[in-house]
Image: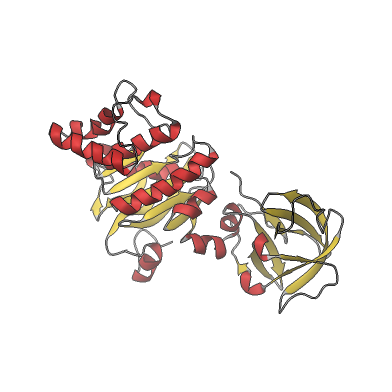
Amino acid sequence: MATTDTVTAETRVALSPNFRNPAVRVRGIEKRYGSVQAVAGVDLEVADGEFFTMLGPSGSGKTTLLRLIAGFERPDAGTVELAGVDVTRLPPYARDVNTVFQDYALFPHMSVQENVEYGLRVRRVPKSARVERARAALEMVRLGGLGDRRPVQLSGGQRQRVALARSIVNEPSVLLLDEPLGALDLKLRQEMQGELKRIQREVGITFIYVTHDQEEALTMSDRIAVFNQGRIEQVGTAVDVYERPSTEFAAGFVGTSNFLVRDGQRFTVRPEKIQVLSPGAEAPGQLHAEEGAVVDLVYLGAATRMTVALDTGGQVVALRQNLEAADIAPPFPPGARVRVAWDWAQAHEIETSPVADRSNTSTRRAEV
């Protein structure tokens, strides 16, 4: 990342596709809580109208940075800019941002319509205008006709939609979302992911989204910043972060990766890129192949995950699509000899993260 004092044009292009007019820019942001460095000198730019996700495990600094942007916390060092204006010392109400929380924070004694109108009422928007804008916001989140209900009469997904409508009705330049889908069940969370992306496209507001869910980040984001111990390991599109991870941590946290060292270079290969063949079978094309034995087999529904101990040492994980019926015996049960093969063009050289396991060959699964 660029330093606080010097940000070259080349670096800005890498940080943001619209670097000339970023919606949010943070430079050299630091935040400590006693001896704990929650955010350690982060530089970041988010483009106007972008769906930007901050992804990382608990304690990685992503939520703290979101609170610094919102104004709920003051940085120990660095600056926060909104649309080019330094807002570092401004209180939350003076910043053109709104925040959606995981717990909805709805007023239980108010109706849905009144909850959505609340921010407009505080701003002294005339009643007729706020009623119309609140109804439009509820239509946007597909809750039209439910304005007279109380939050307790709604499902969890509906309450989250009300919280979203209450935030977008004020038409902020930036909407901050702190793990807003974390309390929902898997099916509803997946439905809401699509809804959030649809709403963001329609309203055109810059979304900055915090999550620890890798699938959520890959599904919804224009770009993703991977956080680790108060720092950013990588910023890029979903394809960049998944297919071309910069560090061992990024490769291991976003999905599952196999880490291999060959000829003194460290690579990551995704499990779905590895083919499992019968022992002695010729590898297709120019694929690199190694022998080993299956040590674990896990049925995942659409695919089967196989862990193979290589004769040369270490293990790799491979995914094999279940094209046959589920009740057919697996062709490579535990103990079976196999050959695994991959294309080096689909392997990606990586740097070693400070907190990554430094063994020569390892497999790391994301901790969710």
141 with respect to 299 (left or right): left
Find residue 72 and report its horizontal and vertical position in percent. Answer: 34, 37
231 with respect to 10 (left or right): right
Vertical position of residue 49 compared to residue 31: above or below: below
Find residue 263 and report its horizontal and vertical position in percent. Answer: 71, 73
The residue furthest top is 109
**Colouring of the image:** secondary structure
Residue at 61 percent across and 45 percent down: it is 367
Vertical position of residue 187 compared to residue 149: above or below: below
| Relative depth, front residue between 285 and 355 | 285
Residue 336 picture quarter: bottom right
6 with respect to 259 (left or right): left
Q: Is residue 38 visible?
A: no
Quadrant for the N terminus in the image: bottom left
Residue at 61 percent across and 68 percent down: it is 349
246 with respect to 123 (left or right): right
Q: Is residue 77 visible?
A: yes
Residue at 66 percent across and 73 percent down: it is 344
Vertical position of residue 116 compared to residue 258: above or below: above
Quadrant for the C terminus in the image: top right
Residue at 21 percent across and 39 percent down: it is 133
Find residue 54 and report its horizontal and vertical position in percent. Answer: 45, 50
